[in-house]
Image (tube, rainbow, N blue to C red):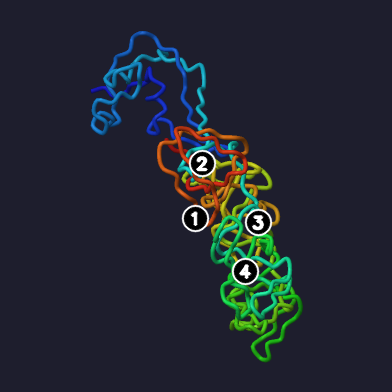
Amino acid sequence: VDRRRLYTSPSIYYSEKAIYTEPSMFKGQRARIVLQCRQKNDFQVCGETIGWESDHPGVLISPNFLNSELEWFTTKRGAIIPYRILIKMESSKIRVQWPFGLQTVSLTDIAKCDPQDFWRVGDIVVTSQPLTVGAIVIPPGTLGELKTLKTAHENIVDFFGKPIGLTTVSDSWVRKCNPSEFLKAGDFVEATSDLDFQGLGVVTVGSLGKLTTLKGRCGYREVDWGSYGSPVKPICAVRDSHVKKVDDSKLISVGKTVRALKDMHFPKPNGRPNETTLVCEGDFGTIKSVTELNEDLCTVAWTDTALLTRCKSATDFRVCRPSEFFAQGDWVRPSKNLTFSVSSPATSLAMVRLPGKLAGSITITKDTIGAIVRIGIFDD
């Protein structure tokens, strides 16, 4: 049988299948490309050859053609003339858990919440006025951890270093802390001066370490210096005045989301000699490895191209601020009023106070908060 044939299809639905046009990512959108052609009427017709009928019996690929007539072929030279490039762009969608259930929205429908906009269990709070609990006076500026969201305007807080147990406070008595206002286990810190640990080594000013635990109630904390380039190997106790918290947006570490500072060409994996893949200025990526915490060279996985490259943090990319991107688990609010059809009971969102109400359709306003549960290009 002569298999030297040129194949086309009368159906765009068939032509766009991934087996024929491999999708490419561009600026956060998925692109599919096919060629539109003119063809002489001397072709033969056959059915689909991608196994669709066996996987989806009786289901049409195209509303305009039978599955048995989706492939045309010819052996004649010059019988097919490509004359137009067709591009289909598919945008990422976001699945959000709202007070009444899950709904799919576009990137332009929502905005990321500022962490100060809402309360959740585990937040660090600080007293804004003196509080008296029995015989104990809690001065302004005392830190505590939010343990329970009790009512619409009250919370249960565990104040650090105060022998009073869990305390019910009004929202107006405390405020939520900014991350820069407190230290917690897992934070990266830097030495504010040279620290001599008496024979264990010297940590120089500016050296980075990771806060492990609070050693006691006397103001000492334990820091792991040895894992981050310092000659001091053990975990050492320090006072709060010996260290300061590192601005998270400036820290180069595994898992951080970054953006390209310029257009960059990298060799294409398994490509031909001199064939490259372009990472565009502004493209997002994720740091996968760092040579050392203080080093400049990192391995970055770029989102649009699925490319893994070695890059320099000083010249090739910068760490993103949380407000620049969406991620699973982020808290968001509508950028405009959104109306959805609702057919299921209301479900509350853990750790956030939200109204829950439900009828055939519902409009959520810009002060409603939801949580992202999925991001990507998918069918509803």
Residue that numbered label 3 is attached to: 312
Residue at image x 35%, y 16%?
Answer: 64
Alpha-carbon neighbours of circle 3 within 10 Å: few (<14), some, or many (≥20)? some
Please give the name of the residue rendered at 62% of the width and 43% of the height, measured from the top-left corner.
367
Q: Of discs 1 and 3, which sits in the foreground?
A: 1
Disc number placed over residue 94 in the picture, else none: 2
Give the image quarter of residue 366. top right
> Going by the image, does 339 lie left or right of 68?
right
Q: Which residue lies furthest to the front in this view?
A: 134
Marks 2 and 1: in contact by CB < 8 Å? no
- Residue closer to the observer: 261 or 144: 144
| Dot placed on the residue nearer the N-terminal end, 1 or 3 | 3
In the depicted structure, whether residue 34 falls above or below residue 93: above
Q: Of the residues shown, which amino acid type is indicated by label 1?
A: Ala
Q: Is mark 2 on a helix, strand or loop?
A: strand
Q: Which amino acid does label 2 sit on?
A: Ile
The quarter of the displayed image where residue 150 is located: bottom right
Q: What residue type is labelled 4?
A: Asp
Q: Where is residue 12 in the image (x, y as percent from the top left)?
A: 41, 22
Relative horizontal placement of residue 65, taking residue 93 as reference (left or right): left
Dot 4 corresponds to which residue?
A: 187
Please give the name of the residue rendered at 39% of the width and 30% of the height, measured from the top-left corner: 17
Mark 1 or 4, which is nearer the eye?
Answer: 1
Which amino acid type corresponds to the residue marked 3 in the rendered image?
Answer: Lys
Q: Residue at label 1?
A: 350
Task: Report, in whole angstroms, how far the alpha carbon at label 2 lies from the one at label 3.
Answer: 31 Å
Q: Residue 57 versus residue 93: which sits nearer the camera?
A: 93
- Which quadrant of the figure contains the N terminus? top left
* Precedes in sequence: disc 1 or disc 4: 4
Q: What element carries label 4?
A: loop
Which dot, 2 or 3, sits closer to the camera?
Answer: 2
